[in-house]
Image: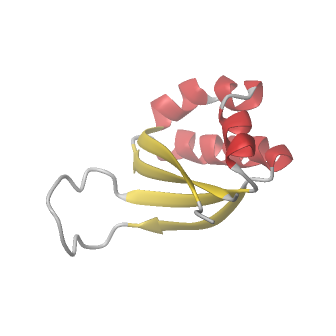
Amino acid sequence: MKAFLVANVTVKDGEKFQRYAKAAGESMQPFGGQVLTKGKAVEKLAGTGSNEHQNVALICFPDLEKLEAWFYSEPYQTIIPLREEAADMIITSYVVPD
């Protein structure tokens, strides 16, 4: 069952974020992770709550096991301090229902 990750992002340091994004992309390749799209918030059309996160990325993995294996892998865990310096993020995993 395919799985995907949504990262809601507020960039704090653009240069560090570029380094993080490159390293994260490289770290997910062995796990079949593929960035489907990235975008920037334009306007809140409905709902209540904060518009705190201004960017979003959608990443697909072959299954939840590969997504979690990537997230908890040593190569990804090593760049978490850089991620925390570069941006505030909410990272959520989802599965595609059968």
Q: Residue at x 75, y 43 (%)?
A: 66
Query: Residue 62 location, x and y as percent?
Result: 76, 56
The quadrant in which the N terminus is found is: bottom right
Tell me which corner region of the image, top left, top right, bottom left or bottom right, holds residue 98: bottom right
Query: Residue 96 location, x and y as percent?
Result: 59, 62
Q: Residue at x 41, y 66 (%)?
A: 40
Tell me which corner region of the image, top left, top right, bottom left or bottom right, holds residue 15: top right
Residue 79 to residue 52: above or below: above
Does 23 sit left or right of 4 as displayed?
Answer: right
Residue 23 to residue 75: above or below: below
Residue 47 to residue 10: above or below: below
Q: Residue at x 42, y 51 (%)?
A: 8
Q: Which residue occupies the extreme left position in the image?
A: 48
Q: Which residue occupies the extreme right position in the image?
A: 30
Query: Residue 3 location, x and y as percent?
Result: 64, 55
Does 81 sit left or right of 39 as displayed?
Answer: right
Q: Residue at x 55, y 39 (%)?
A: 16
Query: Residue 39 location, x and y as percent?
Result: 47, 68
